[in-house]
Amino acid sequence: MTNAAASPRWADSSRGLGRLIETLIGISVFRRPLFFQARQLIIRTAERNGIPWRQRREELRLAAEPLRSSSTSAGVHPPDYYIARFHAYEQGNLCWQAAAEAEQATDAMALRVWPDQQLTPVEAQQMLRDAIHAAVEPLLNGVQHRVLDLGCSVGVSTQALARWLNSRAAQRGELSPELIGLDLSPDMLAVARVRDREALVSEWRHAAAEATGLAAGSIDLISLQFVCHELPQQATHAVLKEAARLLRPGGVLVMVDQDPASSVLQRLPAPVATLLKSTEPYIEQYFSLDMPLALQQEGFRDLSISACDPRHRVIACLR
């Protein structure tokens, strides 16, 4: 179940550049400088573009640390694939630094999407979310009673989804939906609770996306944003199976992630590609997976695929 033809050259470890990058990442003496350079580049670029990276990190960490214990569910243990060096953090997503920097990293990602436009971080983020929601709108049918954001991180996508759905419900004279943000990192969830000052989200749930503990057929809309490129293929299949179990008949799944066909990603300069691949341990598996076929095999139908920006695509489908 592959789509290797669409994979960027730098992501394929069986070919020249991809093989070289894979070798460098596997050697600690090279990997650590790569991680350091990746982090410094990200932080410098973000602060130059108006994102108060380090200041915001300390604010969030201090506010969220007291909430970590109450954001942790007993018996929830991260699977082996989750204990990986994501995003230049040796502890991956299971550390305060990753959680307290996720908001800033998301804003920086949105700015990178439109480098030639003079946008503020807020404007770039809004453009990205508007494009995502516009792709979902045609598939929504009836009242959205219960919505789940799988792999919600610190809740940037969750809160944007809540604001859009609440506004949509108000215009239609409907009640706002119950919204659940679910993640496997208690650090991320603690920060999400700090950020959710308006109490837009009904529950911040500590669980794995492939084992949510929620009832079958209990969800109207599932959002899976910027998650699957951080999963090995086996885990992606498990998450899609769980999403199919959770959605009611006619329920909607929306997936947002990197677009294998993006000309921007296909043409990344070698130094940038090296930094990206060094911080995304499963990116090759993501690019080689035929996602539409994987969805169809789990019973999803009426797939629509559209680019929401020059780097990312939206796949929306019905259960």
Image (cartoon, rainbow, N blue to C red):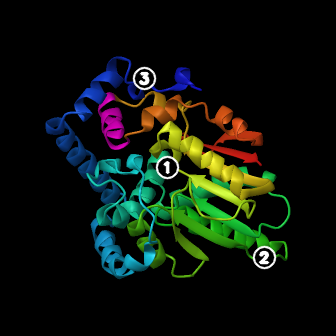
Q: Nearer the viewer, residue 148 or 275?
A: 148
The alpha-carbon separation of the residues under discs 1 and 3 comes to 28 Å
Pair 1/2: label in front: 2
Secondary structure mostly seen in the magenta stretch: helix
Closer to the chain start, of discs 3 and 2, is: 3
Q: Tell me what residue is drawn at x 43 percent, y 79 percent.
A: 70
- Residue beneath the point at 40% across and 50% down: 82
Label at residue 9: 3
- The answer to if 301 sits in the magenta stretch is no
Given the image, on which type of amino acid does mark 2 rest? Answer: Ala
Label 3 neighbour load within 10 Å: few <14, some 14-19, many 20+: many
Q: Is residue 317 above or below residue 152?
A: above
Spot occupied by residue 139 in the image (x, y as percentages of width and height): 79, 52
Q: Is residue 116 visible?
A: no
Q: Quadrant of residue 281?
A: top left
- N-term-proximal mark, 1 vs 2: 1
Mark-to-mark CA distance, 3 and 2: 47 Å
Residue 294 in the image: state x and y as whole percent: 65, 35
Q: Are marks 1 and 3 in contact (CB under 8 Å)?
A: no
- Residue placed under numbered mark 1 in the picture: 117
Q: Is residue 120 left or right of residue 295?
A: left
Residue 277 seen: yes
| Percent of width and height locating residue 211 | 56, 57
Report the magenta residues as a range: 270-280
Q: Choose top left, top right, bottom left or bottom right for residue 289.
A: top right
* Residue sitting at x 74%, y 46%: 317
